[in-house]
Image (cartoon, rainbow, N blue to C red):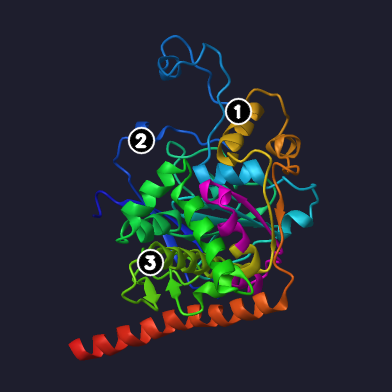
Amino acid sequence: MEEDAYLYLQIRNSIDSEMAMSNALVSKNSNYEPLKQQTKSSGSALEPPDQSSRGVELGLKVGTPVGTSLIDAHAGGVGVMESVAYDKEAICHRLVLVCGTSTRHMAVSSSKLFIPGVWGPFWLVSKSLFNVPDILLSGELVSMVPEYWLTEGGQSATGALLDYIIENHVASPRLANRAASQNISVFELLNKILESMVQDLNSPFLAVLTEDIHVLPDFHGNRSPIADPKAKGVVCGLTLDTSEKQLALLYLAAVQGIAYGTRHIVEHCNAHGHRIDTLLACGELSKNPLFLQEHADIVGCSIVLPRERESVLLGAAILGAVASKKYSSLSDAMKALNVAGQAPLVLVIHPAKDPKVKKYHDAKYWIFRELYEQQLSHRSIMAQALA
């Protein structure tokens, strides 16, 4: 170990001097060539492809500008964050939901905020910050939105959880056949079933259908804000019912559980310095109106949808536009190309005005939080039994 020492790049992500580190192990005797020798900020132009480059093999024309990339969720943030009118203060009140198989929750702030259980804050990463060899790292990296600190929460399984709930139910094959016969998705059919149940039962609002079913969605651990990889999912309120209607209720309860998780993240971030009051949504789940309305009602924030629903692709295009010098900076490109949707194509989803809806979700949210506390208690009891 002494001869082949390792360099730890340690990024602090905690509060009150507690260090929760993300460690990158790099051998001093390693071949650095695969890592290259320079880092670039997002959208910075890379060396354009020539006849001998891999870019040409991928179909790019010689000389095509290529921008430095971002990971997919951050590209989604670039593609949506400026969808509403730009304002240096207002941008700090927004939370981007990139919701698909999992969900990322990204917010920016003008000052660095260390939040337990939430990644960040991210700003500039440079060789001087880490005191690493020049051969390994030079230049700098910029967080998702230039000039702002990025805070990033997440849920490890959202779309994946809904798929799991649906596909492992005995009614799933029948439901899939019905959806196919109507040329609609399974989610659209489930939403229709729930709407018909509201009418049949004369329910005051759709969410009340799950008063006896509660879901803690941590089937793949809790990423934020608890940061507990040992957390498990919980479904409370099962019966022997195997009907499509019962599956619809379980699906609705799972959607609500995911939304309660987002509310937990928003409340936690706001308690540590953020002032989030608006959600911006993109990703496949943002195309589901029930998913959006439950989030708006449960979190208590309006949800703005961008005109370009494939915001991750738009974010990648913005990086290319900056690399091609179409825009002088990433910020300018975002302001020009991020556009909120216009009715009737896209709507702003507002929370329900009925105070009974808020009261109902406040009660279910308390149960949601209690399910995890009970899990901790059960974990402790079993640990003592096995000690």
Report x, y in % for residue 161. 40, 59
Classed neighbour count for the residue bearing mark 2: other residues with Cα under 10 Å, few (<14), some (14–19), many (≥20)? some
Location of the N terminus by quadrant is: bottom left
Report x, y in % for residue 301. 69, 64
Q: Circle 3 is placed at which residue position?
A: 221
Q: Nearer the viewer, residue 377 or 40?
A: 377
Q: CA distance from mark 3 to mark 2?
A: 35 Å
| Amino acid bearing label 1 | Gly
Q: Mark on residue 320?
A: 1
Q: Mark on residue 67?
A: none
Span highlighted in magenta in the image: 267-293
Question: Which residue is depicted at the point 79% across and 52% down?
Answer: 88
Query: Tag 2 or tag 3, which sits nearer the N-term?
Result: 2
| Amino acid bearing label 2 | Tyr
Q: Mark on residue 32?
A: 2
| Amino acid bearing label 3 | Gly
Q: Residue furthest left?
A: 386
Question: Which residue is depicted at the point 42% across and 19% down?
Answer: 58
